[in-house]
Image (tube, rainbow, N blue to C red):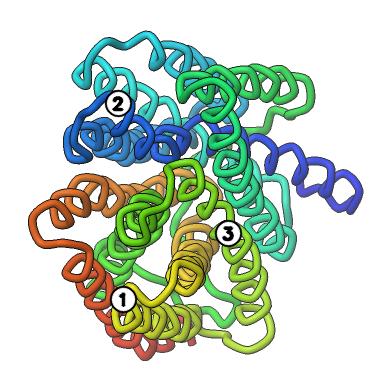
Amino acid sequence: MKIKDKRKVDRLLLLFSFTYFVSYVTRINYGAVVSEMVTSLGLPKSTLSMALTGCFITYGAGQLITGFFGDRIQPKRLVTVGMLTSIVMNLLIPICFNPVQMTVVWCVNGFAQAFMWPPLVKLMASLFSPEDYNRGCVRVSWGSSLGTMFVYLMAPLLIALRNWQTVFVVCAALGLMGVVLWNLKCPNIELAPAQEPCKERSGGSVISVFSPMLICVMVAIVLQGILRDGVQTWMPSYIAETYHLSNEISILTGFVMPIFSIVCNQATGYLCRKKFQNPMQCAAVIWGVSAVSALALYLLSDYSAATSVFLSAVLTGCMHGVNLLLVCMLPPRLAGAGRVSVVSGMLNCCTYIGSAVSMYAIPLATENSGWEVTILLWVLAAVAGTLLCSVCIRAWRKKTL
C-alpha cells in the first residue's frame, strides 16, 4: 500500500536521507583524507589509492548481488547488516599496518556499503507514489551531498587537532547512531513477486534489457562515475600540488563541491518535471554543461585556486545531476515493482565501475603525465557522455511514445 499522508512520507524521507548520509560518511572518508595519508605514511598516491579502487570494485559488484536480494529479502534487514559491517571496517582502518591490510578492509567496506542504495530504492518504490518517489530521489540525494560536506569540513579539523585516524572513529560513531535510528523507525514492506517491465502511461514499452539504448545509458553512467568520484576524490590533491596549499586547506576545498551537488540535483529535478519529458534530453543538456566546465578547467589550469575549485564543483555537481536522472529516476521506469531493486543495482554498479577506474587511473595519470593531461581526459569523458545521451534522445522517444 502506498503512503498518502504527506507527513509520513516526509518523515520516512528524512530517515532515508539520514541513512544515506551515514553511508556516505562511512565510505568517502578514506578518499577525503588520502592526501594526508600520503604525507603521513610517506607512500605514493597510486599505492594508497588501491584501497579506493578495491572499495569501488566491491561496491559495484555488491550492487548486483544486493539488487537481486533486495527484491527477496526485507530491505530493512539488508541495510542493517551493511551498516554494522561498515562500522567495524571504519574502526579497523586506523590499526592497519600496511596498504595491503587497508585495501582488504576497505574492499569489505565497499561490499557492505552496497547493502544501502538498492534497498532504499526498493523501499521508496514500494511505499511512495511515482511523484513522491521522484521527489524522494532528490531528497535522499541530499544525504550524500550533506555527508560529503560533513566529511570535508570535519576531516581537516580532526587532522589539525589529532590525526587522520580520528576521522574514521568519528564516522564509525555516526554509523552506530544511524543503525539504531534505522531499526527503530524503518518499516518492513511486503515483498511482491517479480513483475514484467512496466509500461509508460501512453502504453508503449520502455527499454528491453541490454538494448542498444540501455547499453549507451550504462556507458554514460560509467563515465559519470569516473568524473563524479574521480574529481571529488582527487581535487584536493590537485589543489595542493598545483597551488602549494597545505593538506588541511586543500581538503577543506572539497566542502564546496557538495553545495553545487545539492543545487544541481534540485535543478535537475526541476528540469525533469517542468522542462524535459525526455530524460535523455535532460541528461544530454547537463552533460553539455559539464563538458564546458571541464574545458574551462583545462584552459584555466594554474589560473587561481578559487577558479579551479569553482569549475571542479560545477563539473561534479553536473555529474550528481546525471546520476540522479540515470541511476535514481530510471529504475521504476525500466522495471516493475518486483524488479526495481535489481535494475537499480545494475545501473548503480555501472557508476562504481567508473569510480573504480578513476581511483587508480587518475593518480597514475598525474604521476606519469601531470594534471594537465588528466584534466584533458576529463574533458573527453564529458564530451563522450554528452554524445551518448544525445544519441539516446530519439530512441527513448520511440520507446515511450
Name the residue type under label 1.
Answer: Ala
Residue 57 marker: none
Whole-Å distance between the Cαs marked 3 and 1? 21 Å
Query: Are circles 3 and 2 on residues that touch, CB within 8 Å?
Result: no
Residue pointed to by mark 1? 382
Q: Secondary structure at mark 2?
A: helix
Q: Is residue 198 visible?
A: no
| The N terminus sits in image quarter | top right
Name the residue type under label 3.
Answer: Val
Q: Secondary structure at mark 3?
A: helix
Please state if 309 lies on the left or on the right of 39 as rendered: right
Q: Quadrant of residue 262?
A: bottom right
Name the residue type under label 2.
Answer: Cys
Q: Quadrant of residue 101?
A: top left
The mark nearer the N terminus, 3 or 2, is: 2
Q: Quadrant of residue 232?
A: bottom left
Please determine whether, in this image, residue 256 is positioned above or below residue 61.
below
Picture coordinates of residue 20 (x, y %)?
60, 40
Q: How many marks?
A: 3
Whole-Å distance between the Cαs marked 3 and 2? 28 Å
Residue occupying image coordinates x 42% and y 16%: 89
Picture coordinates of residue 345 (x, y %)?
40, 45
Residue occupying image coordinates x 27% and y 77%: 379
Picture coordinates of residue 168 (x, y %)?
50, 22
Please determine whether, in this image, residue 263 is positioned above or below residue 129.
below
**Residue nearest the viewer, comparing 391 with 204:** 391
The mark nearer the N terminus, 3 or 1, is: 3
Residue pointed to by mark 2? 107
Whole-Å distance between the Cαs marked 2 and 1? 28 Å
Residue pointed to by mark 3? 256
